[in-house]
Image (cartoon, helix red, strand yellow):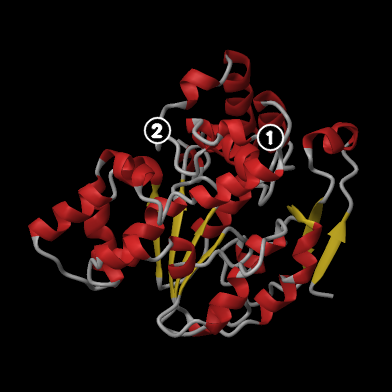
Amino acid sequence: MTFEYIDIEDPVFKATCRECNEEDYVLVRCNDYANVPINLPNWTPDPVCLSRRFEQIGQTIKDMEVRPDDVWIVTYPKSGTTWTQELIWLVCNGLDFQRAKDVPLDARFPFIDLSGLRDLPEPFNPLRDALAMSSPRFIKTHLPPAFLPNAFWTVRPKLVYVRRNPKSVAVSYYHHSVSLHCYRGSLDQFVRSMMNELVYYSPYHKHLIEYSELRYPNMLSLCFEDMKRDLPGAIRQVCRFFDKSYTEEQLAALAHHLDFGQMRQNTAVNRRQWVEYNLQQTNRPDRVNDNDMQFIRRGETDGWKRELTGELIEALDRWTLDRVPKDSKYATLFQ
């Protein structure tokens, strides 16, 4: 059996899952991981928090064809995924800004595990679209290494991984879950669920550590905070990885396109139709212009300081120290 589906027995989760709209959450263990090239002794992947709907697509992803000219982006959710997708797609497609505005990012860069989390309105089916796409394909996933296609490790397409500070992830992921996954709990409840590894794609620290320990020659690792501090430098890094060369004027135009103010106004990447659909489905149409309901909110590195209480900040810091001691070689992944 490739995947085992394990009911969540945590008493707090069981007491609140209905009111928070988490009733379909489940722990998924992958038993088919022998070919993953990971540098962790006696590694056994932890179960991952997903949805019961993952049963409909998990094996299809595990068995899917992987092509040498594929480009894959993997992140833990809310780590700068959309921003980096747009950057990668433009670098690899001759800075075709017009097509990037005319064709939604979801169509150019499908999120293959999305239908494993939630029901999608017809005709949206990102996994089906990815399987049928002509090459070169651009594919997004949040899955940890053990869940990727078995063919990934022998075909070796290009892989870009992006990480982000846990406190920023927690706040951004909460707002994302409210607007797109119809989460009904409070910020405090969500953060404590994340620390309990009971939000989609958790455990968070293991996700970052496992990707940092891949012995995979065709991988670029990026950091959201580094990209915010030096976007031109990150753009050049991506260009080198994909063996692309552009003039200084072209690179400046790309940096302007990727400015968060521009990204928020760009309907091809901001997924406003998804937000509107969800708010209509959950009787919240009055919040359609609420900034916290937008797919791309602020893109800040320290916005968590305004939203998290001192108690939650301390709890999140303790959580990371419990998982990754200060003297660990992994500590820099979570700064």
Q: What residue do we see at 44% from left, 77% from top?
A: 137
Q: How many marks?
A: 2
Q: What residue do we see at 21% from left, 48% from top?
A: 256
SS at circle 2 = loop
Q: What residue do we see at 57% from left, 45% from top?
A: 276
Left or right? Give the position of 292 relative to 30: left
Left or right? Give the position of 101 relative to 334: left
Towards the viewer: 278 or 35: 278
Give the x, y percent position of residue 308: 56, 21
Towards the viewer: 6 or 133: 133
SS at circle 1 = helix
Q: What residue do we see at 64% from left, 37% from top?
A: 178
Give the x, y percent position of residue 280: 65, 43
Give the x, y percent position of residue 198: 74, 42
Give the x, y percent position of residue 33: 69, 72
Quarter of the image for residue 160 reads bottom left
As drawn, the label of residue 301 is 2
Does the rendering let one see residue 80? yes
Closer to the chain start, of discs 1 and 2, is: 1
Asked if 188 appears above or below 70 in the picture, the reply is: above
Q: Residues within 10 Å of mark 1 (few under 14, many from 20)?
A: many
Quote the CA–CA distance across marks 1 and 2: 20 Å
As drawn, the label of residue 195 is 1
Asked if 231 appears above or below 114 in the picture, the reply is: above
